[in-house]
Amino acid sequence: MAKSLRSKWKRKMRAEKRKKNAPKELERLKRILQTNADVVMEEVKEVATVLPPQKVLEQADDCKMDTDNKRNKKTLLDQHGQYPIWMNSRQKKKLKAQRVKGKKKAKLAKGLAW
């Protein structure tokens, strides 16, 4: 995709714009970094909480994600009998057919019907 003349032109113009704006962005970045870092941090604190890197690393070690650890590797079903959200209906149908095929009921002995 994205092979039309219009998209090629737009990509070219975006590249030109990046080249044109790169020196201004670099200058702006340098100016921000040269100023007192505390002032910048104060502005950022209004939007987000700022933590030192050591605390962030400690928190990352403490919390572990508890996702998909209760999923059967063979059937891909979780503990509630649900398939993963990324699986499409054809794949679900195929896996279900394999599951049901493996569970085939034992045939009942034929008897005389009176």
Image (cartoon, rainbow, N blue to C red):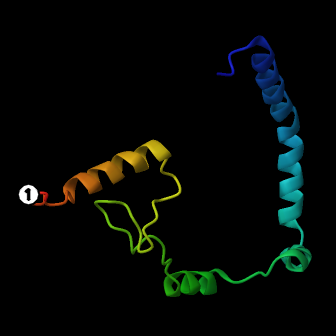
Residue at point 58% right, 85% down?
A: 59
- Quick one: SS at disc 1? loop
| Residue 26, horizontal then vertical, whole percent | 83, 48
Q: Which residue is mark 1?
A: 112
* Residue 54 point in image, percent of width and height: 60, 84
Residue found at the far front of this picture:
114
Q: Quadrant of residue 40?
A: bottom right
Q: Residue at x 75, y 18 (%)?
A: 8
In the figure, is residue 86 to the left or right of 12?
Answer: left
Quadrant into which the C terminus falls: bottom left
Residue 1 location (% of width, % of height): 64, 21
- Please tell me how many numbered marks the rendered image carries: 1
Residue 21, above or below 86:
above
Instruction: Name the amino acid, label 1.
Output: Leu
Residue 89 image position (x, y, % from top left): 48, 46
The quarter of the displayed image where residue 31 is located: bottom right
* Residue name at image x 85 percent, y 77 percent: 41
Of residues 98 and 43, the one nearer the viewer is 98
Looking at the image, which residue is at 87% across and 32% down? 20
Of 20 and 61, the residue lying toward us: 61
Q: Residue furthest top?
A: 5
Disc 1 crowd, CA 10 A, few/some/many (<14, 14-19, 20+): few
The answer to whether residue 41 is left or right of residue 64 is right
In front here: 68 or 97? 97
**4 over 28 or under it: above or below:** above
Q: Is residue 57 left or right of residue 104?
A: right
